[in-house]
Amino acid sequence: RGTLSFEDMISDVTINPDPLDEVGEEFGFDGIGEFCHRGMLEAAKYVHDDMEARKVLHNAFEDHPEFNLRIMGHSLGAGVAAVLGLMMRKEYPQLRCLCFSPPGCVFTERTAKESKEYIWAYVLHNDIIPRLSYQSLANLRNDVIEMIARIKVPKNQVFAKNMRFRSESNIQDPSKILHERESIPQSAFYSQFSDYMERQKGREKHEVLQVRMICPGKICQLYRTSEKLNNVPCSPIIMCLKCIPATLGLARTQKYTVLWTEAEDLSEICISSSMMSDHFPYNVARALQVAAEAVGVFDIKTTEINSNEDMQEGEKKRS
């Protein structure tokens, strides 16, 4: 599961990279020169030690030796699942991990790429969490501060217009409210920002901050291809009424495109009205269900295929 407690929040913000050298020696993988998100590593160790102490998997496989092992999680839980999979893969070679909306700072590059053999990650549209890393947050911070310096109208005008219902007719022309990047006028604010950026360059040379961690596994991204009312998940409270029909199953959408993507494509935070709601588990589940049905993948527990024609049609869609 994702973040639900104060302890989970501590794990989230413990973003410092921990070396995997000793962990690799203990669990039988090559961790030399590789790093992992500290909070997720500590959580994975706790889960592993707890299962070992209570012999959870030992008893389960004793009762069902024909089963394979699947580790699943969402958000923080997806990151912990990925680390746990790395730790347990030698003991369970057929292990697979399904990571829904994993954080964008789990493993360093080599380990993340090697994890494509056993980890599948699922990302919905503009979800902010798979894009979160020290580097992406620093870039967003710098962009926001620079944008404030570029605004050439009173700030309240910018926010007032963006609080209204948006349509093509009231979208603001950036050239009317922003200075060009090359012609930002000098001000006390901009001078302080420039000094701050110079100080940051020195701080970011620190070895720990040079470690770049990315999203794990083979990444499947679901892109929303329509902005119609029933296709965009809830975000602001004022817009929640549009989710009621979808929740009741009265307004469902078929407007998703599913593509394989790389971790490098998730290196920048995308500012969007759905950047938070795309992370919600029920929105991810709904998108996956719609996308699966669109290519002929059926839930065998709830859908009965009554004829060979239906099966052949599903095979055509899958191909």
Image (tube, helix red, strand yellow):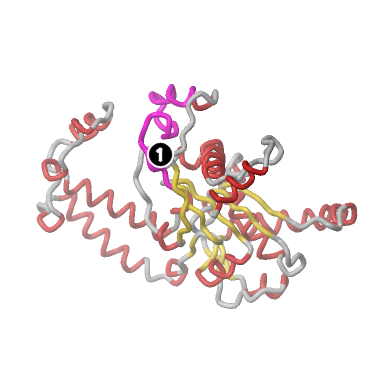
Residue at disc 1, secondary structure: loop
In the rendered image, which quarter contains the N terminus?
A: top right
> Would residue 87 be found to the left or right of residue 258 on screen?
right
Q: In the picture, residue 38 is in which quadrant?
A: bottom right
Front position in the image: 105 or 98: 98
| Residue 233 among magenta residues | yes
> Would residue 247 be found to the left or right of residue 170 on screen?
right
User: Residue 209: image x %, image y %?
Assistant: 43, 66
Front position in the image: 288 or 51: 288
User: Residue 119: image x %, image y %?
Assistant: 61, 60
User: Residue 239: image x %, image y %?
Assistant: 39, 25
Q: Residue under circle 1?
A: 274
User: Residue 157: image x %, image y %?
Assistant: 18, 32
Q: Residue at x 71, y 38 (%)?
A: 301
Q: In the picture, residue 264 is in which quadrant?
A: bottom left
Please tell me how crowded label 1 is: few (under 14), some (14-19), or many (20+) other residues with Cα within 10 Å.
some
Q: In the displayed structure, would residue 208 be above or below residue 132?
A: below
Q: Residue at x 89, y 52 (%)?
A: 63
> Would residue 198 be found to the left or right of residue 302 on screen?
left
Q: Which residues are magenta?
A: 223-245
Inspect the image, locate mark 1, and give the three-letter code of the amino acid beneath it.
Ser
Q: Residue at x 44, y 53 (%)?
A: 131
In the rendered image, which quarter contains the C terminus?
A: bottom right
Front position in the image: 126 or 201: 126
How many marks are shown on the rendered structure? 1
